[in-house]
Amino acid sequence: MKQDSAKIILRRGGAIIDPDALVEWYSGRELYDRPKHVKINGVWEEVFTYEKIIRQEELNTAREIVFRCHIGDNRIIEIVIAD
């Protein structure tokens, strides 16, 4: 999945927090390897833990990578990367 063709969305529950999200990524081997920080309402938040989920329908080639991230104070957000 190429970074310039992918769409990054932030959501909490089912609601979109920021359709034009800014995410700082750990520079690993993969393009979207590990989120370090995420910008919510103009404030950078640190990602403490995350779970990576890859969703893809059988008949469709489009896929979605979801990072469920704990950002402190019992707040969990999802970073969704879609083709």
Image: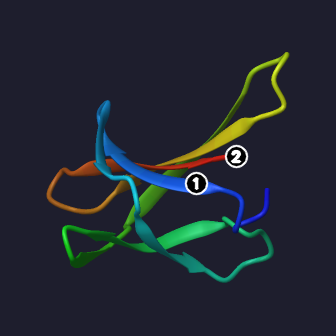
Q: Residues within 10 Å of mark 2 (few under 14, many from 20)?
A: some
Q: Position of residue 50 (x, y in %)?
A: 47, 55
Pick the front one: 74 or 1: 1
**Residue named by callout 1:** 7
Q: Above or below — where is 57 with respect to 36?
A: above
Identify the residue shown where x is 52% and y is 48%: 51
**Residue named by callout 2:** 83
Image quarter of the N terminus: bottom right
Q: Position of residue 72 (x, y in %)?
A: 22, 62
Inter-mark Cα distance, 2 to 1: 6 Å
* Element under disc 1: strand
Amino acid type at image mark 1: Lys
Q: Above or below — where is 6 with respect to 22?
A: above
Drawn side of residue 43 relative to residue 50, left or right: left
Q: Position of residue 45 (x, y in %)?
A: 28, 73
Q: Residue furthest bottom?
A: 27
Q: Residues within 10 Å of mark 1 (few under 14, many from 20)?
A: some
Drawn side of residue 77 relative to residue 56, left or right: left
Drawn side of residue 9 relative to residue 17, left or right: right
Q: Residue furthest top?
A: 59
Question: Are the residues tagged 2 and 1 within 8 Å (C-beta)?
Answer: yes
Drawn side of residue 72 relative to residue 51, left or right: left
* Element under disc 2: loop
Q: Position of residue 22 (x, y in %)?
A: 42, 72
Pick the front one: 76 or 57: 57
Identify the residue shown where x is 70% and y is 67%: 3
Amino acid type at image mark 2: Asp
